[in-house]
Image: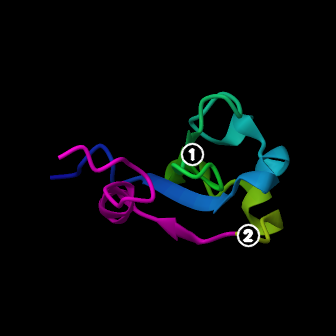
Amino acid sequence: MKDIFDDRHYVIFQTSELYLVDFRQVNEDSIHTVRKSLDLNEVVLKWESLNGVPEFIDKLTTLVGIYNHSEILKIMASLEWQNDLF
């Protein structure tokens, strides 16, 4: 059975390159709706692969990686992305 996240992909890159993002090609609306790492140095964006890879991805020089849903969940659970409240 196909999961609703099977066609979703994520990218992590440096906040300094947010000006390159064409928000019409991703699920976020603006620089104000992107998820940022706790130190504010990195951001994550998501898009549906049915629409293809966003064109601006090739322009990112600080690209950390492109991930599927299960991979990004592991990354988002790290201390770089969330406080350890427990």
Disc 1 marks which amino acid?
Answer: Lys
Which mark is drawn over residue 22? none
Q: x, y percentage for residue 68?
A: 40, 62
Say which of marks 2 and 1 sits in front.
1
Please say if 1 is above or below 57: above
| Res. 25 image quadrant | top right
Question: Pointer 2: what residue?
Answer: 62
In the image, which residues are magenta? 63-86
Q: What is the three-letter code of the residue carrying label 2?
A: Thr
Residue 61 appears left or right of 33: right
Task: Please give the residue where the numbered disc 1 appears in the rendered image.
Answer: 36
Q: Is residue 75 magenta?
A: yes
Q: Residue at x 66, y 28 (%)?
A: 32
Q: Residues within 10 Å of mark 1 (few under 14, many from 20)?
A: many
34 or 24: nearer the viewer: 34
Q: Report the Cα–Cα distance between label 2 and label 1.
A: 14 Å
